[in-house]
Image (cartoon, rainbow, N blue to C red):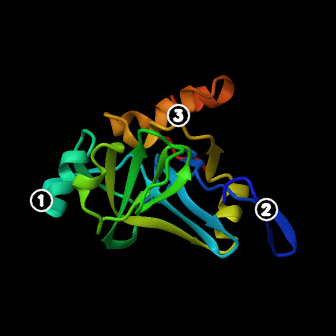
Amino acid sequence: MQGEGQAIGGRSVESMTGQLLVATPTLKDPNFDRTVVLLVAHEPGGALGVVLNRATEVPVSDVLGDWSRLARDPAVLFEGGPVQPDSAICLARMRHPVRRMKGFHQISGAVGTIDLSVDPERLRESLTGIRVFAGYSGWGAGQLEQEIADGSWFVLDALPGDAFVDRPDDLWPMVLRRQGGMMAAVAHFPSDVTLN
């Protein structure tokens, strides 16, 4: 649950579910270089998220058929992360965020995950769009918190449209620029500069 305090190692930690992890220029892991990750779950046992800005060239229609009609442009699969790349996580945005819907698990506001075993036609009127991710990003207990403390990630508030932008390659600088101040300056950091 977002915003609820949780005890981890004897100390209270706020859940970051629904927030963005934005890779800092010091994070050079090729799986996460200049990525924006939406945290789908953050609990005492660990965290799970999907990379929002790594589109593939594989059309959703090639993999999930009827679901492609609900996919936002670009209507392709996204690389959600290095864990279980043969599995799929589907994010959806509801038209009316207060309405309960079978197969929809709310992450934050109108954004949540959707059960792909549900008939997509039944959801057409309730959703403004979906995005499908192959694989996910995962962290064990305390691992993400340590990476944040080490300066690998900025933790920022997500906007409802972040997971569904038309130009996902522009998401990293876009999220940083909207923060203003010094954070906005990071958006212009050259990608070929190595930091120690």
Q: Dividing the picture into quarters, in which one does residue 2 lie?
A: bottom right
Q: Nearer the viewer, mark 3 or mark 1?
A: 1
Return the residue nearer the eye: 57 or 160: 160
| Disc 1 secondary structure class | helix
> What x and y, as percent, mark residue 94?
42, 44
Label 3 sits on residue: 175
Q: CA distance from mark 1 to mark 2?
A: 41 Å
Side of 44 relative to 161 (left or right) = right
Which label is found at residue 40? Answer: none
Classify 117 as above or below 147: below
> What x and y, as percent, mark residue 56?
24, 52
Classify 162 as above or below 9: above
Q: Which residue is most to the top? A: 181
- In the picture, the quarter occupied by the N terminus is bottom right
Q: Residues within 10 Å of mark 1 (few under 14, many from 20)?
A: few
N-term mark: 1 or 2: 2
The residue shown at (14%, 59%) is 65
Which label is found at residue 62? Answer: 1
Return the residue nearer the eye: 87 or 51: 87
The residue shown at (84%, 64%) is 12
Side of 118 relative to 196 (left or right) = left
Q: Amino acid at mark 2?
A: Val
Q: Residues within 10 Å of mark 2 (few under 14, many from 20)?
A: some
Q: Nearer the viewer, mark 2 or mark 3?
A: 2
Q: Residues within 10 Å of mark 3 (few under 14, many from 20)?
A: many
Return the residue nearer the eye: 93 or 97: 97
Label 2 sits on residue: 13
N-term mark: 2 or 3: 2
> What x and y, as percent, mark residue 133?
34, 59
